[in-house]
Amino acid sequence: MIDIIITSYNEPKSTLRAVQTFLDQEINEDFRIIVCDPFPEVKEFLKKNINDKRVGFFLDPGEGKSYALNLLLEKLPGNKEDIIVMTDGDIHVSENSLKEIINAFKDPEIGCITGRPISIDNRKEKYGYWSHVVFSGIDKVRKKLSNNQSFFECSGYLFAIRKSIIYDFPLDASEDSVIPYLFWKKGYKIKYVSEIEMYIKNPTNWEDWQNQKIRNIKGHENLTKLFPEMPRTKSFWNEIKHGFFHTLFFPRNLNELYWTFQLLHARLSIYKKAFQDLRKDEVYYDGWREVETESTRTLD
């Protein structure tokens, strides 16, 4: 059995597309979809537009994405051969996603897998270009770490785990980082499957871009307090080590080169702001999208 958890936040049209994308996939294995959203209106919208017993709804209590996922992990029965897929309602995935996930978990040593984020933003605009730079770098680094069978943090846009291995995780860190590490500690491997594509709308203005990235940095930096021994793949120094030259050689023209230098300055700026907040004990808060980015909405 495959349980697909789609966490959303009052984006009924986008969530409908996310659900339908999975329903349209052709696999032999049984699966069910649980939409987790704090707005009952989303449930009513899905009921009107989808007539499929495989789709259910869980009313998110509104305490953050990690809190809701913890509740669901406790409720889902199964064994180590079963799979849980976690993804978001504001993205959609490639039609081969479930097939590739199933194939990856045929290896009993694999505990957690993630796919490749693809920006749907226009590369000819600054923030769209920034998203293409970043996602290209992520793809390069995860391929290398996965091939070397090293630990790496997954993508919250979509990752999948074996069921009945962990039943909860700390709330004060990013779930896409801490859950893979909990599997790693138990001796399981992490795998990057680039054939699984997640299509993502990114922020298109400075305020939204800054809010999203600062919150992300805080979530990952908090891991140092929780698990000081954890190998870090998302950090300031690793970003410089793995991303600096990749970013410099990414532009195709003078306009993109100019945006590249702006991106480097912007990344320094948000790390500075995030570290200042953490020093003032402004810890990571799992408020998720309700305090984030209106410009990342696609259909709603």
Image (cartoon, rainbow, N blue to C red):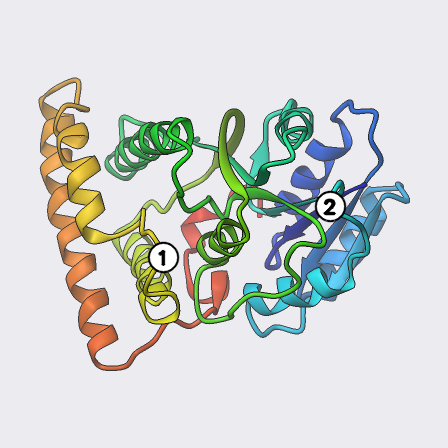
Neighbourhood count class around disc 2 (C-alpha, 10 Å): few under 14, some 14–19, many 20 upward: few
Cα separation, mark 1 vs mark 2, equals 24 Å
Q: Which residue is mark 1?
A: 230
Name which residue type carries label 1.
Met
Quadrant into which the N terminus falls = top right
User: What is the x, y in percent for residue 145?
Assistant: 36, 33
User: What is the x, y in percent for residue 107?
Assistant: 63, 30
Q: How many marks?
A: 2
Q: Which label was assigned to residue 80?
A: 2
Name the residue rendered at 86%, 43% in the picture: 54
Per the image, label 2 sits on a secondary structure element best described as loop
Question: Which quadrant holds residue 245?
Answer: top left
Residue toward you, 198 or 74:
74
State left or right for residue 79 relative to residue 107.
Answer: right
User: What is the x, y in percent for residue 206?
Assistant: 25, 53
User: What is the x, y in percent for residue 49?
Assistant: 81, 43
Which of the two labelled residues, at mark 1 and mark 2, occupies the earlier sequence position?
Answer: 2
Name the residue rendered at 58%, 37% in the picture: 110
* Extreme-top residue of the structure: 252
Name the residue rendered at 30%, 63% in the picture: 221
Per the image, label 1 sits on a secondary structure element best described as loop
State left or right for residue 201 relative to residue 109.
Answer: left
Can you say whether 75 is above or below 253 in the image? below
